[in-house]
Amino acid sequence: GESVGLHLPTLSVQEGDNSIINCAYSNSASDYFIWYKQESGKGPQFIIDIRSNMDKRQGQRVTVLLNKTVKHLSLQIAATQPGDSAVYFCAESNTDKLIFGTGTRLQVFP
Amino acid sequence: NAGVMQNPRHLVRRRGQEARLRCSPMKGHSHVYWYRQLPEEGLKFMVYLQKENIIDESGMPKERFSAEFPKEGPSILRIQQVVRGDSAAYFCASSLGSGDEQFFGPGTRLTVL
């Protein structure tokens, strides 16, 4: 399930299930969006990106969906594995700097 | 192919001291970005530099913080007279060109006692 509290929202999924992580972005002029994975004690790692002229992009086990009408971005992870456990951030850009969302912690249990 | 390098990985300073954080971009990258991350939060943009130029420093505090990216050597983020509120993880990213994918370093974790 998903919970929101004083700390990062957390999504708990069972190994093998699909995960969906959501993100709302703020600037309708943003034209480039990226999902990052951050493991404890490490820097953000690029997962997948999408430009505003697209609404869907697929990678290996990951899919990003972009809904510009409601300024919503989602990351779908197929067949979630224990190694997917991390904090996931969406980021938007319309100039050179990235604006990061607050992040979602993904916990994968056996 | 070495990625973005940052050092030190951990830095402890007492209030009032200076902190110097270094970032070596990926080979061939001439664009460097600095971000700050507080626990349980997303990264916040601080400054964007190209060689010898500050392009965007809209996220930098007006006082005590400065950044440079000289013609030779790493980019430096300098924090003078540190306070406890400066404790955070500082990440550097680099890109090949403007608007290209940003690759992040492992970060420097600054603790101010």
Image (cartoon, coloured by chain):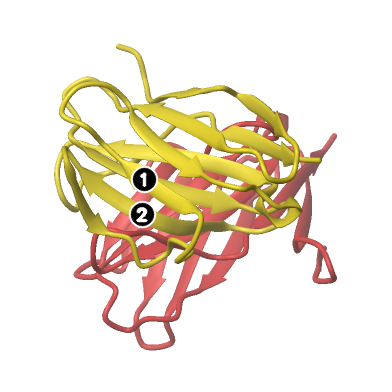
Tell me where residue A8 appears, x and y as whole percent. 75, 61
Residue B76 x %, y %: 39, 34
Q: Nearer the viewer, residue A15 or B47?
A: B47
Secondary structure, mark 2, is strand
The quarter of the rendered structure image containing the N terminus of chain A is bottom right
Quadrant in the picture for residue B15: top right
Disc 1, SS: strand
Q: Amino acid at mark 1?
A: Ala
Could you classify mark 2 by the number of other residues whose Cα lies within 10 Å: few (under 14), some (14-19), or many (20 or more)?
A: many
Q: A85 and B88: which one is in front?
A: B88
Q: Which chain did the renderer colour red?
A: A
Q: Chain of mark 1?
A: B
User: Which colour represents chain B?
Assistant: yellow
Q: Which residue carries the number 2 mark?
A: B47
Inspect this view and state whether residue A45 appears. no
Q: Residue at x 38, y 65 (%)?
A: A92
* Circles 2 and 1: CB atoms closer than 8 Å: yes
Pointer 1: residues within 10 angstroms few (<14), some, or many (20+)? Answer: many
